[in-house]
Amino acid sequence: MKIGYFADGPWSHRAIKKILLDPTLEITFICARYDNPDLILKQIAIEYKIPFLTHPKINADEFIGHIQNLQSDIFVSMSFNQIFKEKIIEIPRYRTINCHAGALPFYRGRNILNWALINDEKDFGITVHYVDVGIDTGDILIQKKYPITDKDNYKSLLEFAHQECAELLLEAIKLVQSNQVKPIKQNEIHPIGFYCTQRKEGDEIINWENSSREIFNFVRAITEPGPVARTFLNDNEIKIHEVKWIKEAPRFKGIEGAVIGVDDEGFSVKTGDSFVKIIKFEGYKNPKIGDRFSNSKK
């Protein structure tokens, strides 16, 4: 089966290597992001003598005419950043599929792993689905769910998802190849689902009025390689890398954002319901009781 591969980044690197190991599969072209083409994908293309493409508008007639001549059986999207329109979706006989690190029809959209942690989910999904004219709304080929524990953070989920997306994508391709796909419409799982918007600069600021559990989830959701949670002490921006949630901590009222304890492990900060302990941070020296953090410089 011949595959046209639209891709970018680590998500796509593992997957293409798996595809290339299967002698019954062939990559007819690799189309990388136009603004910042993936150099690893480019090197793979050179090594395997695969046409390497970029184009600012993949739905343009010029580009469509070019890829039609390459005669793919299926198009695969893996972390690609352009929207596929109907004309390009329907070019190959097996249409176009996408691998998405979210349990569709929930967690459509962007920054899914971050949002799953922020929402205190106990698991996250990976879905391979047909591409349609909506955003992450096409019929599902295959979906699996994986547990999230309190030991997980953005880095651990991302590394796991990179590996499992590659596995699940290859599994989906083989289902298509063997004509064993039994597509599931997303509204059979839930009539509505939901969409997550892209997180942007400024979304990394801690709101100390949130509960301790919410702050714990927020910090671990955007730790490295994410932007890292931030707070401010007067004019100083402080990065908070790791927070300890203390399940047995008492609930009490106080000044949210105030430092209420300091010890060898770190320092404790009052939250909306109790307190959390900050155990990994930078930009803050000599914490002392009474310091007050805010969500902006003063």
Image (spheres, rainbow, N blue to C red):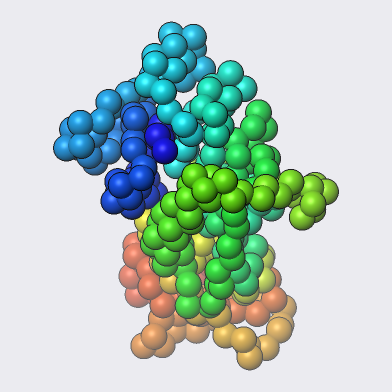
Figure check: 212 above or below 13: below
Question: Which residue lies most toward the left here?
Answer: 47
Residue 80: percent from left, percent from top: 45, 36
Judge by depth and name the residue closer to the eye, 140 or 296. 140
Residue occupying the point 41% across, 23% down:
71
The outermost residue toward the right is 191
Residue in the image at 37% along x and 21% along y: 70
Q: Residue at x 33, y 50 (%)?
A: 22
Whether residue 196 is situated above or below residue 55 in the rendered picture:
below
Q: Name the residue furthest top.
A: 62
Residue at 36% over, 42% down = 25
Q: In this orientation, does residue 13 appear?
A: no
Q: Could you say where residue 113 lies in the image, as x and y percent from the top left?
A: 53, 57
Task: Please tell me how many numbered marks the rendered image carries.
Answer: 0
Q: Does the rendering let one see residue 266?
A: yes
| Percent position of residue 245, x then y | 55, 80
Query: Which image quadrant: the N terminus?
Result: top left
Q: Nearer the viewer, residue 19 or 40?
A: 19
